[in-house]
Image (spheres, helix red, strand yellow):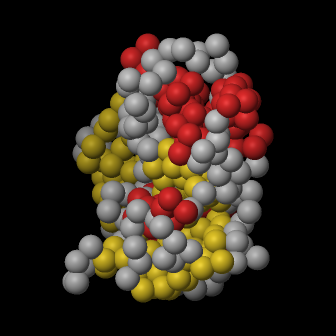
Amino acid sequence: MALIELKQITVAYDQKNNILKNFNLSVEEGEFLSLLGPSGCGKTTTLRLIAGFNEAKDGQFLFDGKDYTKVPVHKRNFGFVFQGHALFPHLNVYDNVAFGLKLRKTEGKEAKEKVHRILEVVNLKGFEDRYPAQLSGGQRQRVAIARSLVIQPDLLLFDEPLSSLDANLRIQMRMEIRRIQKELKVTTVYVSHDQEECFSISDKVAIMNKGEIEQLDSPQVIYKQPKTEFVARFVGFENIIDTAKAGAAFTSASTGGTQSGKWAIRPDDIVIGEDGALLAANVSQGTVKVTTYLGREYQYVVETQLGEFIVNDGREKPYEHGERVTLGFPAEKLVPVL
């Protein structure tokens, strides 16, 4: 049985606009699940619903088999890590971390042991007397994580916790978050709009679009086998081919004998050659409309009878604007999408 179950959940901020409608989600105990998608897709609303900050208009939220739909925030033993740390500037690290314990009337020796133990877990031993202004961004984030973990939560929730950090620090912190989650085996739901961030730390990822989950699977499966056109584009399959329009240019080797449906392919997987140079199946002639230097390679926008395609290629001498080229679409690189 899943630890978290959202069943037919509807959340609306007014009478007309539903953020989530008939929404369903299951999370297994000990699992690290990320909710990923563009702004406005409903991922933060889902997280806040689980936390108890948002109330469902319809539907049911079950936690460990118990109905939590109407359980108030303070009665849910959930840890929540906010986007902006939300540390108390007038409290030192120790008192910030111990705050949740104090609310739960846990004090004295027991509180000290718990605070010192969790500071060791997040690699902040020796920082007890420092104040937030004396810490780096990554250290402040670790304090926020420690504060959420010290209460021994039944569930840990993250709302875009790394968005305010620079790129190198984000990479370090996501590794720390994954290490801590694995060590403590706490079930975690994590919200981000950063694909690489989610894929690097999650057991499963739910790709959301307009209040619905378009695909929920392991990062590896989503990356290699996106189910829908939206998911494909979101994870880097920037080119979509409608085989119904492709006609004889696409053979049964790639489409399994059918001439309908859509297929996705990454820019790195399209072969580009001089006009007429490619003799394999699944080719299309086109004209280079844009040439962009990316450092290690060039990226082209090529207009063909099948539409425009984005193509990456590493040849030293680039194709020029207006040059005629042939594009090849290897059958093994084409992924069917809805």
Q: Residue at x 45, y 75 (%)?
A: 212
Q: Residue at x 53, y 45 (%)?
A: 103
- Vertical arrangement, residue 12 with respect to residue 267, above or below: below
Q: Quadrant of the N terminus?
A: bottom right
Residue drawn at x 74%, y 63% as measured from the top left:
29
Q: Using the image, determine if residue 245 lies above or below residue 205.
A: below
Quarter occupied by residue 83: top left
Q: Residue at x 63, y 21 (%)?
A: 124
Which of the 4 image quadrants contains residue 37? Answer: bottom left
- Image x and y of residue 267, in percent: 47, 50
Say which of 107 and 60 sits in front. 107
Is residue 221 depicted above or below 129 in this figure? Answer: below
**Residue 54 visible:** yes
Most foreground residue, 193 or 45: 45
Does residue 329 show up? no
> Tag count in the figure?
0
Q: Position of residue 323 (x, y in %)?
A: 30, 44
x, y percentage for residue 53?
Answer: 41, 62
Image side of residue 289 versus residue 325, left or right: left
Position of residue 89 measured from the top left corner of the image (x, y, whole percent): 38, 25
With 260 as the anchor, is 280 left or right in this view? right
Q: Which of 112 and 230 lies nearest the eye of the viewer?
A: 112
